Image: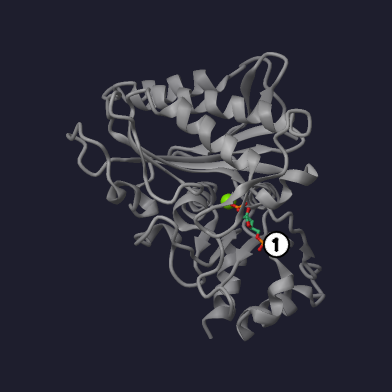
Amino acid sequence: MPIVNMSKLITIERHIVEAGALHPEATGEFSRLLRDFMLALRIVARDVRRAGLNDMLGMTEDTNVHGENVKRLDIHANEVIFRSMDHGGHLCVMASEEAESIIPIPDEYRKGKYVLVFDPLDGSSNIDVNVSIGTIFSIYRRIDESSVEAGTVEDCLQPGWKQVAAGYAMYGSSTQFVYTTGDGVDVFTFDPTIGEFLLTFEKIRIPERGKIYSVNSGNAHKWSPGLREYVTHLLRPSDDGCRPYSLRYVGTMVADIHRTLYYGGIFMYPADTSAPTGKLRLVYEVNPMAFIIEQAGGRATDGKNRIMDVTPESLHQRIPCFMGSTQDVLEVESYLNT
Ligand code: AHM
Ligand code: MG
């Protein structure tokens, strides 16, 4: 089990500064951006922890761009992140799963060279029942770095391989922050007694193969024959003890990916007959998680193509996703593509 290394205590701030120091050409803007974002996450984590006491549970009167009912905590988290990030001078534009179009930086503030896209509170259906939820984010460089004008929708529609950083916070039995800047994946755990995120797992690697699959089986009647066959295969005992697989499905992508990162196996949100492109959003959910999974040594595809090679055409575009241990994802692909 990872524990805090008392001989070398590393806070997220120190980690960010030390990583920045490895790049002498860096201006420090990216480090300051991440520092602002960590403040937003501390606030969201605090409010999630108090949900039930602070009148944050339940619905608003509204539906969002996806036609889904909006939870109060969703809107609150969205607002906290926007208010923490709008005035730092590091961003030129933001986009959120909860907002229909891009979120401009207010006129009075400087426009920076970075772009932030985020899902403020992932796992909405679990909010009211005290099951793990999370925040997912990606950072890109704006397309024209010399510009000082407001960013555009094109800045938010870059393929995942252009991500500068991505990660998530998971509000589980503890609050953890997991992120990558393209040099492996590090895990920090929040210590509420000192108000700091401390490094608890450096350069985590996903197992090559796992024994857990994660999917909403309630949709099995709508899956392709290949996918049904794959899941039947996982449930068939094998002589070497590698199968049957266990099923684990929280219904919060952050939590299901987090477990997959540690234990290996596969997380799937496939296409089906009523959702031909699946449910999860490429820009806010699937690309950041694909970056994390690949950086941990795993694989992330839409069943055929690498997720991070897909250029998004619209902000709320959905995409089927299969991600996790390399061997598991290759295996599902072989069933899907025969
Ligand atoms: P949300 O962003 O509205 O919370 O929706 C995304 C969530 C994911 O966290 C999760 O993997 C998926 O929806 C679960 O969907 P389903 O209930 O269809 O299985
Ligand atoms: Mg989500």
How packed mark 1 is, by other alpha carbons closer than 10 Å (few <14, some 14-19, many 20 or more), is many
Tell me the quadrant of the picture where the N terminus can be found: top right
Q: Residue at x 78, y 29 (%)?
A: 53
Q: Residue at x 34, y 33 (%)?
A: 105
* Residue 125 placement (x, y as % from top left): 70, 52
40 up-or-down from 235: above or below? above
231 up-or-down from 257: above or below? below
Can the viewer see residue 79 in this picture?
yes
How many marks on residues? 1
Q: Residue at x 58, y 66 (%)?
A: 329
Tell whether 25 sits left or right of 39: left
Tell whether 333 sits left or right of 157: right
What residue did someone put label 1 on?
Answer: 214
235 up-or-down from 108: above or below? below
* Residue 34 placement (x, y as % from top left): 45, 27
Q: Residue at x 74, y 71 (%)?
A: 218
Between 314 and 25, the one lying in front of the other is 314
